[in-house]
């Protein structure tokens, strides 16, 4: 089924890769950009719209243009972001606030605008593009790391507010990905990032895009059990780099979710290993969870009853 998809910051890097992935699936795709429209956008028949996510009026105007030409936004990928790197002692207040405004508050602005139409249609998918820097921190990127960490809290809050309207929210946190933004760093720093990845290379934007485009296709468990939705997250979200090849896709389900529904994932993952993780207990309000790996797998093997430490990668929503 064709959906209307908006990717902010979709004129390059991860955003452009996501837009092309959705377009390849037959979706009607729009991208926001502040600069020139790249030829790849035109060739893929993607609808470009000028928008600065730090301006609420510009965001509203962009959505009006998309709604007039394509229809209400059903899938939002909040990807727009900037960097203003520098050590804390040399970082100005403006450098810090500019990054937070674009990366975090900008995601809030577009999510707030998109969810209005999603609630009316009682269906919507929001995907926030964070970064591993938000989890582990990064020297010289206090502003960037803070903004990306904030996206996780934003995503969890949005998920709780709008789950009853069939609007789900997830966050993807890639490691170092070969993009124009990364290319602006010194070569020795890029090499250091690559060496820190088990594969010894930087991730590719298309690898992230495959995951992002897969999310809206996920079937949902409609039982009233808390946290009863599906969760899928790339395994590089917690490893500061690309996953082993092929990437592992984690799928968390509740006890109420039929495991045979995982067969629906098979066409979309294109050969990637899919590992379901069943939640057996959850306590509120601290959200402590205990998970056990099930024996069921689409590919590969795993020990029955193996305990998985910590929280699930990604967001349940």
Image: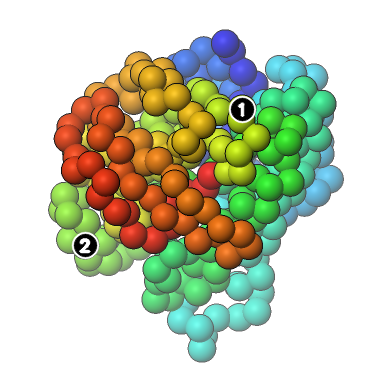
Contact, mark 1 vs mark 2 (Cβ under 8 Å): no
Residue 142 lies left or right of residue 305; in this view the side is right
Q: How many marks?
A: 2
Q: Residue at x 68, y 47 (%)?
A: 160
Residue 230 % position (x, y): 50, 35
Residue 259, quarter of the rendered image: top left
**What number is the disc on residue 82?**
none
Residue at 45%, 24% (x, y): give it: 258
Q: Which residue is mark 1?
A: 222
Regarding mark 1 in the picture, which secondary structure is present there? loop
Q: Quadrant of the C terminus?
A: top right
**Residue at 47 percent of width and 36 percent of height:** 255
In which quadrant is the N terminus drawn?
top right
Res 271 seen here:
yes
Does 157 sit left or right of 211 as displayed? right
Farthest residue to the bottom: give it: 89
**Residue lying at 56% horizontally and 58% vertically, measured from the top left:** 283
Q: Which of 84 and 72 lies nearest the eye of the viewer?
A: 72
- Along the line of sight, the residue nearer the viewer: 274 or 9: 274
The picture places residue 42, in percent across and down from the top left corner, at 53, 21
Mark 1 / mark 2, whichever is N-terminal? 2
Q: Can you identify the residue that label 2 sits on? A: 196
Q: Where does the image place residue 25, in percent across and percent down from the top left?
A: 47, 16
């Amino acid at each position: 089924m064709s959906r209307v998809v908006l990717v902010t910051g979709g004129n390059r890097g991860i955003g452009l890769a996501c837009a092309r992935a959705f377009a390849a699936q037959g979706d009607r795709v729009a991208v926001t950009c502040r600069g020139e429209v790249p030829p790849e956008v035109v060739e893929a028949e993607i609808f470009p719209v000028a928008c600065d996510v730090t301006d609420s009026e510009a965001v509203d105007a962009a959505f009006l243009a998309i709604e007039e030409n394509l229809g209400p936004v059903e899938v939002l990928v909040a990807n727009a972001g900037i960097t203003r790197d520098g050590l804390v002692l040399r970082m100005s207040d403006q450098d810090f606030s500019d990054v937070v405004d674009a990366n975090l508050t900008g995601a809030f602005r577009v999510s707030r605008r998109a969810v209005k139409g999603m609630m009316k249609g009682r269906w919507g998918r929001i995907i926030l593009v964070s970064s591993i820097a938000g989890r582990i921190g990064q020297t010289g990127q206090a502003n960037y790391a803070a903004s990306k960490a904030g996206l996780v809290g934003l995503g969890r809050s949005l998920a709780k507010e709008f789950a009853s309207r069939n609007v789900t929210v997830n966050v993807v946190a890639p490691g170092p990905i070969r993009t124009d933004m990364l290319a602006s760093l010194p070569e020795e720093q890029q090499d250091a990032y690559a060496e820190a990845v088990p594969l010894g290379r930087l991730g590719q934007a298309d690898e992230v895009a495959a995951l992002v485009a897969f999310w809206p296709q996920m079937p949902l468990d409609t039982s009233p059990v808390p946290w009863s939705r599906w969760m899928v997250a790339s395994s590089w979200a917690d490893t500061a780099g690309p996953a082993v090849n092929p990437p592992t896709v984690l799928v968390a389900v509740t006890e109420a979710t039929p495991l045979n529904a995982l067969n629906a994932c098979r066409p979309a993952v294109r050969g990637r290993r899919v590992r379901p993780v069943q939640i057996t207990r959850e306590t509120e309000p601290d959200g402590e969870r205990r998970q056990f790996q099930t024996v069921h797998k689409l590919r590969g093997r795993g020990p029955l009853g193996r305990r998985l430490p910590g929280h699930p990668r990604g967001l349940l929503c």
